[in-house]
Amino acid sequence: MNKTGSLIIETFESRVLKNNPLKDPYIRDFPVYLPPSYFSSPKKRYPVAFLISGFTGKGIMYLNVSFLSENIQQRLDRLISAGKMKEMIVVLPDCITKYGGSQFINSTATGKYEDYVIKELVPYIDSKFRTIPESRSRAVCGKSSGGYGSVILAMKNPSVFGLMCSTAGDMAFEYCYLPGFPNALNGFEQFGKGHKGVENFIKKKLNYDLPKPGYYHDMLNAVGMASCYSPNPSGFRSKGYNFDLPFDVHTCEIDDKIFRKWQNNDPVRLVGKYSGNLKKLKLIYLDAGIRDEYYLHAGARIFCDKLKKKKIKFIHEEFDGGHMNIPYRFDRTFEIMSQFIKN
């Protein structure tokens, strides 16, 4: 058996994304990792994990090589060689949007990215590669927005993803998003007052120009999340953009009606609604750093406490770290996943 796996770049043409509102590409490239024995054992089938990206990320970025840091192929090869991880196929989708990310949900402002993953990519991978096409052998995992997407995709589609792993996934939105709203408004006002500032930011700064202005991440995060959680297609005509922000664009006062739309997508508020689905999952694993800058360790604690009250099994861990530069936690993700995924 080879000691290293293989990477294949797949090109997939999506029907679901073809007419997406932002005119983002509907033909996308994404990597697929095939384990070391894949070509030497032509009759063997493998479990599969979808490793989804955080905000502003896409699958191919996991291939980056940097000084003293592994890319995803090196990490998976090492874990398999050391016996810490089962051999499995790992899919690295591209679900990025013009606004930075899709949160892996269906939105009238960005596109149907849940359908893209569930109805297109999963069947495509099962048809193209020797997977074990069963939920108990199919996992979804990720960090930050990828962690959020993992929770949402699995809790809504347990017949597709039977295992879910989330590292510092977005949840408890009043903690992870609200603190950034004043900075976002300050940033928008560099480009104009009110809706015009938001419109100008989108038109002038969502591009390759560098350096980026101050508060850039807060602005982009507000735009990206609003496009997913509070879409408003008619907003193009009235405001110049197709979503509603959850705060007043002049005073920054929270708009409770809009923010409730956000909260309707918050995993900590969805446990009751999807408790039956969550009980079907073979693995629920969450971890977060105790110094997470977006307080996502608090969100994970709240989420797990709600699972406990519903008598839903889970594994919850914390580590001494923050939100950034923590891909090393994927070691633990694949180690835990390998204990539960069926091959």
Image: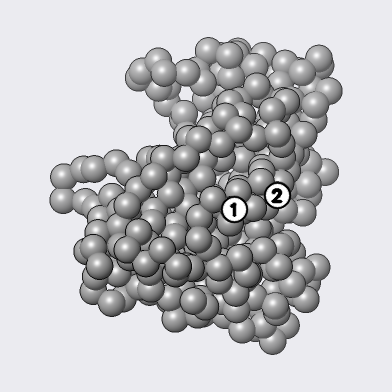
Residue extending farthest to the left is: 68
For residue 23, side relative to residue 37 (left or right): right
Q: Which mark is residue 265?
A: none
Answer whether labels 1 and 2 touch (C-beta < 8 Å).
no
Spot occupied by residue 142 in the image (x, y as percentages of width and height): 48, 57
Spot occupied by residue 236 in the image (x, y as percentages of width and height): 77, 18
Nearest the viewer among 187 and 238 is 238
> The residue under label 1 is which amino acid type?
Ser
- Image quadrant in which the N terminus is located: bottom left
Spot occupied by residue 143 in the image (x, y as percentages of width and height): 46, 56
Residue denoted by label 1 = 127
For residue 81, side relative to residue 53 (left or right): left
Sequence-first disc among 1 and 2 = 2
Residue denoted by label 2 = 119
SS at mark 1 in the image: helix
Q: Badge 2: how crowded within 10 Å, few (<14), some, or many (20+)?
A: few
> The residue under label 2 is which amino acid type?
Lys
Q: Badge 1: how crowded within 10 Å, few (<14), some, or many (20+)?
A: few
SS at mark 2 in the image: helix
Which color scheme is applied?
A: one colour
